[in-house]
Amino acid sequence: MESVAAGGTPPVAAENEEATEAWSGVLFDRFVQYRDLIVEGLARHGEAAISLYPPRPGDRVLDIGCGFGDTTQRLAELVGPTGEALGVDVAQPFVEASIAEAAEAGITNVSFLSGDVQVMDLPGPFDYAFSRMGIMFCASPVATFRNIRSALAPAGRFVAVVWRRKLDNPWVHHAEQVVDRYLEAPEDSDEPTCGPGPFSMADADTVTEQLRIAGFEEITLRRSDLPMKIGNDVDHAVEFNMALGPAAEVIRLAAADAEKVRPRLEAEIREVLAQFARGSDGVTAQSSTWIIAARARAEA
């Protein structure tokens, strides 16, 4: 396996620097802590997208926002020994983890690169680009899509999974409603935020227009509703929601104010998440995403 993690400071757009700091620090640490829940849940949506729009054997594939690299490894498996997969992530800790885990797994047709997909020089052309929850945090979606399109071969396929509305993900929505009753995110904070946030691409019409402007055609968004385990038990689900997601972001930014009401938050979030308890199967709720598919216009 070739390791191509960039030395020095990877390219990052100025408007994405704060999100990069968050994903390289506190959010990476929390992803490690709750990795089993996150990877298992998101993998279902990723597999649903890949089954609808798979890469071809021999394709050169780009995996955007690769995280721990599990999807990059999966794509490398699908394209086979005559193809290759490059995983890209803005957070260097994720890239380092991806390199180590792919090497341990003995995957030889993968490589990884640090950088901000909104502005970095992507080493195309690629036949296929994929992103599982990796594009919602860029400050400029059109610039991001345009950079991806420019790295694709003519008629190259772009496939992505993004969250639909919070309302369609009730475990997220209910926890955020509890937090909003007690806290407001401060305008000024020493804590970095995650950028536009995980639900920034929930509106299908907006995303379609952004892709069209960026030079894509044959654009479709298909709804995918799948169960997602959000805790081994209700207490675990409460911890998860208070560590990652919109509710957790407000708690983290509110800092000392959040600590004052933490017992109350825990009790009320426990109450709203208890409805999703499934006994020995843990706590499982509906999760809803868009599966985006598009092709790069040859003349763009």
Image: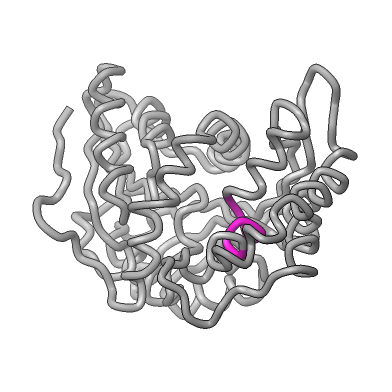
Residue 220 can be seen, yes or no? no
Residue drawn at 36 percent across, 69 percent down: 18
Quadrant housing the N terminus: top left
Residue 35 magenta: no
Residue 2 can be seen, yes or no? yes
Dividing the picture into quadrants, the one containing residue 90 is bottom left
Find the residue positioned furthest to the left.
Answer: 7
| Vertical side of 24 occupied by 235: above or below | above
Side of 163 where 276 appears, left or right: right
User: In the rendering, at what x and y percent does residue 192 appear?
Assistant: 42, 67
Dividing the picture into quadrants, the one containing residue 34 is top right
The foreground one among 286 and 46 is: 286
- The span shown in magenta is 244-250
User: In the rendering, at what x and y percent does residue 44 appear?
Assistant: 62, 34
Residue drawn at 24 percent across, 38 percent down: 96
What secondary structure is the magenta-colored segment mainly? helix
Residue drawn at 73 percent across, 45 percent down: 287
Quadrant housing the C terminus: bottom left
Residue 247 magenta: yes
